Image (spheres, grey):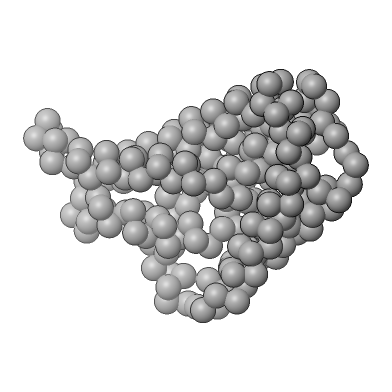
Amino acid sequence: MIQEILTHLPGLLAVYAICALGLLSPGPNVLSVIGTAMDAGRGKAMAVAWGVSLGTGIWASCTVVGLTALMTRYAELALAIRIAGGCYLLWLAFKSFRAALGSRELNSVPSRGNVSFRAAFARGLAIQMTNPKAALTWASIMTLVIRPDVPSWVSIAVVLGCTIVSAFGHSLYALAFSSTHVVLGYRRLRRMIEGALALFFCFAGVRLIVAR
């Protein structure tokens, strides 16, 4: 058993490392956690973070059982998910653009907002699950460790490990950006940041929809 663990350990560590490094390049999921932390506080941001993490676990699980192969074979399924994800990103772009033009300011202490914990959790899950690039990412990552003859515990370790890495990383964003000092710094650059988010979401949404 020890020898079996040592055989698969390098591949598992590589998967965990790639998953962790991916968090250093903010995408819609990270930006959503950050925005929620600043607008609605730490608790709601943590809910978004855990929603994203559940989505990570689902994507990892689906990849292990072959959903990615199914999407590759049936192009219309991949197209539907891509269009849905693109439209959602465009909606986020619209909201960020509207916020950049508005006069809303952040308080010194993050506002708790009206969004429920359930809605925040669902938002994080939706953002992660409507990202079709996640399927391609997981397909690439899994080739490092998943083989036809791989023990079942390796697949379980991949899913659980990546979910934990995602939860830890996104929770750190939620905690950091719920800080009063971070929020005060954001207030000075709010319009610029909201505008940049709008451009990012718009570019990503259009690119997803028109991608071949």
Q: Nearer the viewer, residue 148 or 59?
A: 59
Which corner quadrant of the image does residue 136 belong to? bottom left
**Would residue 121 be visible to someone looking at this image?**
no
User: Measured from the top left, where is residue 21 in percent x and y?
Assistant: 40, 42
Q: Nearer the viewer, residue 67 or 46?
A: 46
Q: Residue at x 59, y 70 (%)?
A: 207
Q: Is residue 50 above or below residue 82?
A: above
Q: Residue at x 53, y 40 (%)?
A: 53
Q: Is residue 174 left or right of residue 62?
A: right
Q: Nearer the viewer, residue 25 or 113?
A: 25
Q: Residue at x 33, y 53 (%)?
A: 141
- Which residue reaches farthest left? 3
Query: So how many labels did they put on this image?
Result: 0
Q: In which quadrant of the rendered image does the N terminus lie?
A: top left
**Would residue 198 be visible to someone looking at this image?**
yes
Q: Is residue 150 above or below residue 77?
A: above
Q: Nearer the viewer, residue 50 or 65?
A: 50
Q: Residue at x 64, y 38 (%)?
A: 33
User: Measured from the top left, where is residue 19 in percent x and y?
Assistant: 40, 44
User: Measured from the top left, where is residue 36 in percent x and y?
Assistant: 71, 36
Q: Is residue 209 left or right of residue 59?
A: right
Q: Is residue 39 left or right of residue 54?
A: right
